[in-house]
Image (tube, rainbow, N blue to C red):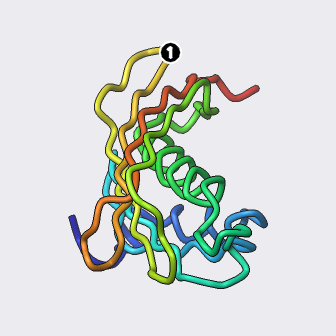
Amino acid sequence: MRQTPDETEFPSLRERVADSPFASVLGFEPIAAAPGEVQLRLPFSEKLLQSLGRVHGGVLFSLADHASGWAAYSTLAEDERCATLEMKINYIAAVHDEDCLAVARVIHKGRTSVVVEAEINTVAGRLVAKTLATFIVLKRPV
């Protein structure tokens, strides 16, 4: 995977990040993209901490959900959309003051669903969480 998105090959990722108020609030940054694979960075911010001084699990879940959704979206036809149908996360380690990277990869694209796995690591490479998600494929109204 490339280290920076190629605007001519995958132009919608930067647009989707910019168009998502929630992704903007959390500070997600697109790092790399290819059809079926997306990498997002979560810069550390004290605003993301819960009361025990760790990055909130909901923030990590949201990071994986966004990366996974955009990876799924990248495999769809022009007349299709997708939405998260189900997602599970295994939290492996706490994050205190580090940036995180989520890498999401489509592992199955069917006619009605897309299955995506994602891994969240610190920038130092420490595994933080793994997710598995299923997205429903929806036809856009004509």
For the point 23% across and 71% down, which residue is it?
A: 2
In this view, the residue in front, 44 or 134, is 44
Residue 9 placement: quadrant: bottom left
Residue 123 placement: quadrant: bottom left
Q: Position of residue 81 (x, y in %)?
A: 61, 34
For the point 66% across and 69% down, which residue is it?
A: 52
Residue 103 placement: quadrant: bottom left
Q: Dot 1: within a 10 Å radius of its alpha carbon, few (fewer than 14), some, or many (20 or more) residues?
A: few
What residue is shown with label 1?
Answer: 112
In this view, the residue in front, 108 or 80, is 108
**Does residue 78 lie above or below 37 as drawn?**
above
| Quadrant of the frame with the C terminus | top right
SS type, badge 1: loop
In this view, the residue in front, 35 or 28, is 28
- Looking at the image, residue 128 sits to the left or right of residue 1; the answer is right
- Looking at the image, residue 110 sits to the left or right of residue 79; the answer is left
Label 1 sits on what residue type?
Answer: Thr
| Quadrant of the frame with the N terminus | bottom left
For the point 54% across and 28% down, which residue is it?
A: 135
Q: Position of residue 115 (x, y in %)?
A: 40, 28
**Does residue 59 lie above or below 82 as drawn?**
below
For the point 33% across and 38% down, which residue is it?
A: 106
Q: From this viewpoint, which residue is outermost toward the left? A: 1
Q: Position of residue 33 (x, y in %)?
A: 36, 63
Q: How many marks?
A: 1
**Does residue 90 lie above or below 140 as drawn?**
below
- Looking at the image, residue 67 sits to the left or right of residue 80; the answer is left
Q: Position of residue 4 (x, y in %)?
A: 33, 78
